[in-house]
Image (cartoon, rainbow, N blue to C red):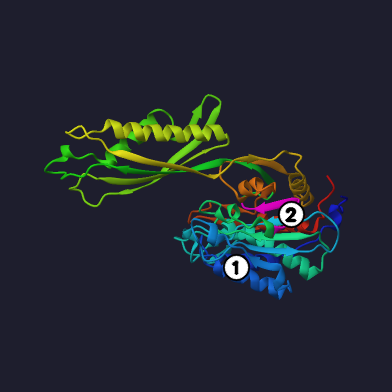
């Protein structure tokens, strides 16, 4: 389909875009508590005269293992000109550290006013890019192809919003674009896959002072297993020949008293790799290490503890071809705003992982987020405004022909 030249690409109202993202950042909305964010977006859509019939929330909370107070927000608009349906998306939940953020502009950056609070540019900036695009379309009365605007929930806790989205409600988009990341000129065309690992360890309780030899420490089993994983190169950065991945044990909980040999312990970790087979190898190494440790540690009667091991795929890896239409359109828009486009692969999970599994190849672009999930998080204003220009161009289909 022929596209207009970059000379006819619409401009944005930078002041309005910055006011929008500042307001979005200030709304509390960690994963599973995105109701107030949805309420704000719905109001802005209503003020822009988007009909209520075009705006829906799906039933994600009924399907997600995390529950949640509200589902994904989806808007479907008919086109005012012909063309394949396009989808623009950016998740709306933040990590808990962002709750209570008060954004403030300092030079070229937006930061959190409070030193102990993260900003939440991840991903209110991406969500704002999508909302700004439709608001500019309505404000300027711009022609556009059929559009789906998609604000997922629960991204930060396992991509649950996109995983459990009601696919029939987003239509059949042919070109999909996600905003969630740093540089606006880089299209992320692939990302790693991830297994969630949960291990319940059962030891044998005994008095730690009177008869420690009668007990089997669940902490001891975990310690042996973790030491084994580290010694044999299966924890942290993992390189085995041509295969690579990562793993981490991030949560350990158990024990009630220092005078009791700990009988129970919960261990939570993850295994990542771009290679699905190698991910399974990492998981297998974890299982073997914990089962071996449970058999090794015995009490004076020769009894051992045991482990209950569970591993579930959180999301699969993916990689789009360089000539995938959404990738080509994204890079054309990047070049049209004066940036040098490029592609990259991510070692983190993205909503695009599940979008691609659902049959909707999705290019992910950045919008100026830096030092995310920390109290030092910032949003680079020039990058965010570039992202808004790119978003509007892709929403209206005015990127140059490729």
Label 2 and label 1: CA atoms lie apart by: 23 Å
Residue 49 horizontal/vertical position (percent): 74, 74
Position in image of residue 101 (x %, y %): 51, 65
Residue 224 in the magenta stretch? The answer is no
Q: How crowded is the residue under tag 2: few (<14 C-alpha within 10 Å), some, or many (20+)?
A: some
| Part of the protein shown in magenta | 170-181
Which residue lies under the disc numbered 1?
38
Residue 177 falls inside the magenta stretch: yes
> Of tags 2 and 1, which is closer to the observer?
2
Which residue shows up at 53% across the image and 64% down it?
Answer: 29
Up the image or down, 56 lies above or below 126; here it is below
How many numbered markers are drawn? 2
Secondary structure beneath label 1: helix
Q: Which percent across, then down, holds residue 71?
A: 58, 63
Is disc 2 in contact with disc 1, using a CB cutoff of under 8 Å?
Answer: no
User: Does residue 116 appear to the left or right of 212 in the view shown?
Assistant: right
Q: Residue at x 79, y 64 (%)?
A: 78
- Is the residue 278 above or below the residue 77 in the image? above
Residue closest to the eye, 324 or 400: 324
* Crowd around label 1: few <14 · some 14–19 · many ≥20 (10 Å): many
Q: Nearer the viewer, residue 313 or 179?
A: 313
Q: Name the residue that disc number 2 marks.
A: 172
Relative to 102, say whether 301 is above or below: above
Does residue 275 show up? yes
As rendered, which of 175 and 169 lies closer to the eye? Answer: 169
Q: Does residue 385 show up?
A: no
Relative to 54, 162 lies left or right: left
Left or right: residue 399 versus residue 265 is right
Quarter placement of the C terminus = top right
Answer left or right for 52 relative to 306: right
User: Mark 2 or mark 1: which comes first in sequence?
Assistant: 1
Task: Quadrant for residue 141, please give it.
Answer: bottom right
């Amino acid at each position: 389909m022929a596209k207009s030249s970059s000379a006819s690409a619409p401009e944005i109202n930078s002041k309005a875009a910055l006011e929008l993202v500042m307001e979005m950042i200030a709304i509390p909305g960690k994963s599973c508590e995105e109701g107030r964010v949805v309420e704000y977006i719905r109001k802005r859509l209503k003020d822009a005269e988007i009909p209520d019939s075009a705006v829906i929330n799906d039933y994600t909370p009924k399907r997600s293992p995390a529950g949640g107070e509200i589902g994904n927000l989806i808007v479907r608009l008919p086109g005012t000109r012909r063309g394949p349906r396009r989808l623009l998306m950016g998740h709306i939940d933040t990590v808990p550290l962002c709750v209570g953020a008060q954004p403030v502009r300092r030079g070229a950056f937006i930061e959190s006013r409070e030193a102990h609070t993260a900003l939440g540019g991840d991903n209110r900036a991406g969500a704002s890019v999508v909302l700004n695009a439709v608001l500019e379309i309505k404000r300027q009365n711009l022609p556009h192809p059929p559009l789906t605007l998609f604000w997922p929930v629960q991204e930060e806790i396992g991509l649950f919003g996109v995983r459990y989205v009601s696919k029939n409600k987003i239509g059949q988009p042919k070109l999909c674009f996600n905003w969630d990341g740093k540089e606006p000129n880089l299209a992320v065309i692939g990302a790693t896959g991830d297994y969630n690992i949960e291990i319940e360890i059962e030891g044998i309780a005994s008095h730690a002072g009177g008869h420690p030899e009668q007990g089997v420490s669940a902490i001891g089993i975990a310690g042996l297993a973790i030491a084994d994983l580290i010694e044999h190169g299966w924890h942290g950065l993992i390189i085995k020949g041509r295969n690579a991945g990562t793993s981490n044990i991030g949560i350990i909980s158990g024990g009630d008293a220092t005078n009791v040999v700990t009988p129970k312990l919960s261990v939570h970790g993850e295994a990542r790799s771009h290679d699905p087979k190698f991910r399974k190898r990492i998981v297998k190494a974890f299982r073997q290490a914990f089962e071996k440790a449970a058999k090794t540690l015995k009490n004076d009667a020769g009894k051992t503890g045991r482990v209950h091991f569970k591993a579930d795929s959180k999301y699969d890896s993916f990689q789009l071809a360089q000539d995938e239409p959404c990738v080509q359109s994204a890079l054309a828009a990047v070049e049209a705003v004066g940036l040098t486009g490029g592609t990259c692969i991510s070692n983190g999970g993205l909503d695009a992982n599940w979008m691609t599994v659902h049959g909707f190849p999705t290019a992910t672009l950045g919008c100026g987020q830096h030092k995310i999930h920390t109290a030092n998080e910032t949003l680079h204003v020039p990058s965010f405004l570039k992202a808004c220009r790119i978003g509007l161009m892709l929403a209206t289909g005015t990127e140059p022909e490729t």
